[in-house]
Image (cartoon, rainbow, N blue to C red):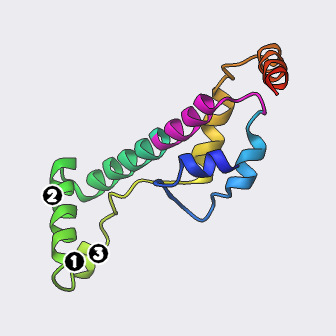
């Protein structure tokens, strides 16, 4: 749990993410690199979800994604200086936020980089060193 929390400290997580529950889904054989893969793959899932959302919104508005991004950028700049119109406020945020589903999708796909035998060997070496 603590390693996962440290790896995700700069990520935005929505309210569905309970790191203690997610850590229970992760096999004990996962190394630090495997946990990093969980976090980065979850981020990729969240980015893909945002891209799909932007594509859908652009299609609904019958404009290109590049124009939609320009509108969002203009809204964000305008928001720093004054109130925005309701229509502009309907535009999505470009902030990537991880949700529980992102983790649920990636955890089963990641294979542990260490076998139980390798872990036992490392633990044996560690105990011999004192």
Compared across the picture, whether 106 is left or right of 122 comes to: left
Give the SS element for disc 2. helix
Labelled disc at residue 79: 1
- Which is more N-terminal, label 2 or label 1? 2
Q: Position of residue 82 (x, y in %)?
A: 17, 85
Q: Nearer the viewer, residue 36 or 71?
A: 36
Q: Quadrant of the C terminus?
A: top right
* Above or below, comparing residue 69 to residue 23 in the picture: below
* Above or below, comparing residue 56 to residue 117 in the picture: below
For the residues labelled 1 and 2, the Cα–Cα distance comes to 14 Å
Label 3 crowd bin: few (<14), some (14–19), many (20+), radius 10 Å: some
Which residue corresponds to the image point at 58% horizontal and 29% vertical from the top-left? 33
* Above or below, comparing residue 41 to residue 78 in the picture: above
Q: Which residue is mark 2?
A: 70
- Which is more N-terminal, label 2 or label 3? 2
Report the number of discs: 3
For the residues labelled 1 and 3, the Cα–Cα distance comes to 9 Å
Labelled disc at residue 27: none
Q: Position of residue 57 (x, y in %)?
A: 32, 56
- Which is more N-terminal, label 3 or label 1? 1
Give the SS element for disc 1. helix
For the residues labelled 3 and 2, the Cα–Cα distance comes to 14 Å
Which residue corresponds to the image point at 49% horizontal and 41% vertical from the top-left? 45
| Label 1 vs label 3, nearer the camera | 1
Q: Position of residue 118 (x, y in %)?
A: 77, 15
Labelled disc at residue 89: 3
Q: Indicate whether residue 121 is drawn in magenta.
A: no
């Amino acid at each position: 749990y603590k390693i996962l929390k440290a790896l995700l400290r700069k990520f935005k997580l929505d309210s569905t993410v309970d790191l203690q529950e997610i850590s229970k889904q992760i096999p004990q054989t996962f190394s630090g690199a495997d946990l990093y893969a969980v976090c980065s793959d979850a981020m990729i899932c969240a980015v893909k979800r945002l891209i799909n959302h932007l594509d859908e919104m652009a299609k609904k508005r019958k404009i290109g994604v590049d124009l939609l991004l320009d509108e969002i950028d203009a809204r964000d700049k305008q928001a720093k200086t004054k109130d925005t119109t309701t229509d502009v406020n309907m535009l999505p945020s470009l902030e990537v936020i991880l949700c529980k589903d992102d983790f649920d999708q990636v955890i089963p796909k990641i294979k542990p980089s260490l076998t139980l035998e390798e872990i036992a060997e490392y633990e044996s070496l560690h105990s011999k060193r004192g």
